[in-house]
Image (cartoon, helix red, strand yellow):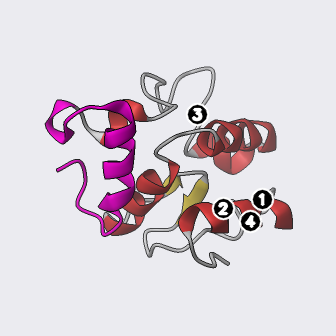
Amino acid sequence: MLCSWKGEHQMTKVEDMLGVDAGDFQWTDLAACKGLPPQSPEKDWFFDGYETNKDIAKTTDQMCNACPVQRICGEYAIENRLEGCWGGIYWTPQGKPDAVRNNHKQPKDWKGLERVYGRPLM
């Protein structure tokens, strides 16, 4: 199984579209950020840089919004109580969007994210 979260049906649709078996890869293999170091001397895309640099945060959001496994990524963070930017949202360990670290987002951004996640987020 690719992931254990309750929305695994979404991943099954991706597998069907690609014509592959679930055992051939993990959801992270399809992530837009695959191969990008989460932290490097130049940029910290998902943690400190996201927290302190709105340009990095916006670029990271754009990458996440174009990612085929955006929702799976965010749900993974919630399920595993992870902090940082996952699936285009900076999450707290309690599984809530961090209001301060996401304050660069506009109402239209939240509407798009709510469509992806299928529920209200803020």
Marks 4 & 1, CB-CB < 8 Å contact: yes
Q: Dot 1 lies on which element?
A: helix
Give me the C-alpha separation between circle 1 and circle 2: 6 Å
Give me the C-alpha separation between circle 4 and circle 3: 23 Å
Q: Which image quarter: residue 48?
A: top right
Give me the C-alpha separation between circle 3 and circle 2: 22 Å
Residue that mark 2 sits on: 113
Q: What residue lies at 49% left-to-right and 56% top-to-bottom? A: 71
Marks 1 & 3, CB-CB < 8 Å contact: no
Other residues around mark 1 within 10 Å, as few (<14) / some (14–19) / many (≥20):
few
Upstream in the sequence, badge 3 or badge 2? 3
- Label at residue 110: 4
Marks 4 & 3, CB-CB < 8 Å contact: no
Of marks 3 and 2, the one in the foreground: 2
Residue that mark 1 sits on: 109
Left or right, 72 with reference to 70: left
Q: Amino acid at mark 1?
A: Asp
Give how far across and how far down residue 112 sits, in percent.
72, 60
Give me the C-alpha separation between circle 1 and circle 3: 22 Å
Q: Could one spot residue 98 in this view of the protein?
A: yes
Q: What residue lies at 75% left-to-right and 67% top-to-bottom? A: 111
- Label at residue 68: none
Q: Amino acid at mark 2?
A: Leu
Marks 2 & 4, CB-CB < 8 Å contact: yes
Q: Amino acid at mark 3?
A: Asp
Give how far across and how far down residue 110 sits, in percent.
74, 65
